[in-house]
Image (cartoon, grey):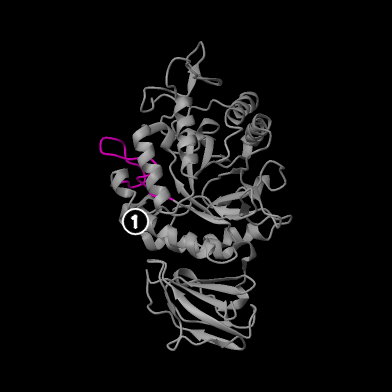
Amino acid sequence: MLNISENKRFMMKEDGAPFFYMGDTAWELFHRLDREQTAAYLETRKEQGFNVVQAVILFELEGLAEQNAYGEVPLLQDEVGKYDPSRPAEIADRYDYWKHIDYVVDYAASLDLVIGIVPTWGDKVLLGNPFAKGPEIFNVDNAREFGRYVGERYKDKPNIVWILGGDRNPDERIAVWRAMAGGLREGDGGSHLITYHPMGGYSSSIWFHHDEWCDYHTHQSGHFGRHLANYNLITKDYHIYPPKPTIDGEPRYEDHSVNWNEELGFFLDYDVRQAAYWAVLAGAFGHVYGHTSVWQFYEPGRTAYSGAKLHWQEALSRPGAAQMKHVRALFESRPFLELVPDQSLITNQLEGADHIRAARGRGYLYVYSATGQPFEVSMGRITGDHVRASWYDPRTGETSSAHKQEQAIPNQGKQTFLPPTSGIGEDWVLIIDDAAG
């Protein structure tokens, strides 16, 4: 089971080791893939360095009426044909919808992958979206009952976190979401962490910071434009007291049309890298990647949403997905539980596409220059009389010396650093380490 760190900033494994949350967005995983496709997808993401996959039980795209790969649906209907959350479609002698979810959770566990389970997409509580299918089926009573059922079913599975919300702000239906959270707690006995996934531009902290069940915060920076300053939402959450871990659970997706307008272009690998490094260096405990074809498991013949062009199997190997392992590798390479955001390390953080983020641990620091712009570092903020500086390439994960002669430099005064290349897509991370190791 995953836990929250003592300082309330990070996730931890049961043995106390940090858990860097490197998530992939697979909303339709339970609903659209068969066992063989599921295994191939999970194995690919495991190889690419992901350790979390986020998927929805009752999804937005006809998630109630459209059958899964085995001809099954998640809920039974009542006497007037309405899908009833209090009646899960468990069929004793068939491989029903829920048995397939069991398989996915167990196969993920065999690969040491966590499943971020979204019990229902938000449209089943409040439509609120142009392509939401609904219908609205939840009220306070059946939301608690459904949460209790799901929590009880998976209470002993160690590789789960719960994600409520599903791209909706709770607002006038907040009692329904609190009831579902209460049901999950009753069902699993509090054994799994819970968060809430709101609409673009919002964080769960707005509504649920003081709710006991909300263990960590999720915000959605969304897909509204390039260079969205997701670090501002992270920073705001980071400074709320008492602290809770925070993450950008839905940033700009690779190959998603910018602001849902193909004339504005599509987000590239650079865009998803930028969002990841900005977020973690602002204080996030990990990051979530998404690809616009993969979340919906798009293939020709299906309706394409958000500019999906590629078959989902082809989209699995897009460069941004392959580069997420370098994000995780960097932050796992040094004591992650020490990391604190610190913009005072740099004298000019710049704005817009050029924005520079910095963070440090006890004996190391990172500075991310989103477009390779030069910057000045205030030295002496980490341990050591002398330090060593190196460049980390977010595209390849390769490291090179930041000094021609690779010598240690005094850890005092101010030092100017010029990244190897500059321009859009030429992002770099400066690493400075205590030379004494």
Q: Is residue 291 visible?
A: yes
Residue 27 sits in quarter: top left
Q: Amino acid at mark 1?
A: Phe
**Mark 1 residue crowding within 10 angstroms, few (<14) / some (14–19) / many (20+):** many
| Residue drawn at (47%, 69%) of the image | 352
The quadrant the N terminus occupies is top right
Determine the residue located farthest toward the top in the rendered image: 79
Residue 116 lies, in percent from the top left, at: 53, 42
The quadrant the C terminus occupies is bottom right
What is the total number of numbered labels drawn onto the structure image?
1
Residue 162 lies, in percent from the top left, at: 58, 39
Q: Which residue is mark 1?
A: 266
Q: Is residue 226 visible?
A: no
Q: Nearer the viewer, residue 351 or 341?
A: 341
Residue 40 lies, in percent from the top left, at: 35, 41
Q: Is residue 298 magenta?
A: yes
| Residue drawn at (67%, 45%) of the image | 208
- In the displayed structure, 266 sits above or below 166; it is below
Q: Main secondary structure of the magenta part?
A: loop
| Residue drawn at (30%, 35%) of the image | 302
Magenta part of the protein: which range? 290-308
- In the displayed structure, 393 sits above or below 178; it is below
Judge left or right: residue 101 versus residue 192.
left
Q: Nearer the viewer, residue 138 or 191?
A: 191
| Residue drawn at (44%, 62%) of the image | 326
